[in-house]
Amino acid sequence: MTERIIFSAGLILVGVVGYLVARNAHLALVKRRQGHSGQDNIPGLGAFEPGQPAVLYFTTDGRIPCRTNVKPMLQRLITGLGDRFQVLEIDAMHQPEATRYWNVLSVPTIFVLDLHGKPRHVHYGVVSQTVLRTELLGG
């Protein structure tokens, strides 16, 4: 019985470490791509205004978690923070170039961008308002 618990804990640990490594590799890939292209040429950042952090949110029309969880959470965040950040929403189905550039494999995918449009954090799936707020405010 103890061996099963240790084995299960080991598998969980390997999964968590693998997830963190993959997420960091994803951010590194996008940062490298941005280093090779001018700010004006980055798909999905056409409406980005430098000087303010942003949430770059990949969604599709038909995703229920996007409609029922993420969009209302972003609206509450906008209500709470006002104009201290910007939201850039990308429909992954209608903007495949941006989806490929940012290497988005599933929706919702949310990037938190710094004042210069560089990705600092990425979230796959639904993320809490508290986490996004902390990341946007520099925590």
Image (cartoon, rainbow, N blue to C red):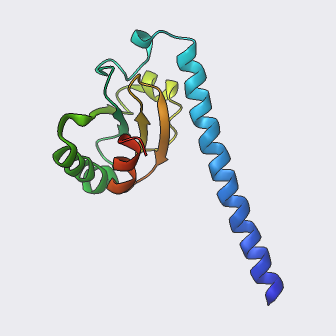
Q: Nearer the viewer, residue 136 or 125?
A: 136
Q: Nearer the viewer, residue 103 or 53?
A: 53
- Position of 60 with respect to 83 (left or right) is right
- Please provide percent x and percent y for residue 54: 34, 33
- Position of 48 with respect to 37 (left or right) is left
Q: Nearer the viewer, residue 87 or 135?
A: 135
- Please provide percent x and percent y for residue 122: 49, 42
- Please provide percent x and percent y for residue 87: 28, 34
Q: Nearer the viewer, residue 138 or 121?
A: 138
| Furthest-bottom residue in this view | 1
Look at 52% across and 11% down and name the residue there. Answer: 37
Look at 68% across and 67% down and name the residue there. Answer: 12
Q: Identify whether 78 is placed above or below 11.
A: above
Quadrant hosting residue 44: top left
Look at 69% across and 55% down and name the residue there. Answer: 17
Q: Identify whether 20 is placed above or below 49.
A: below
- Please provide percent x and percent y for residue 138: 41, 41
Number of marks:
0
Rendered-image quadrant of the N terminus? bottom right
Quadrant hosting residue 40: top left
Q: Identify whether 85 is placed above or below 47.
A: below
Look at 53% across and 18% down and name the residue there. Answer: 34
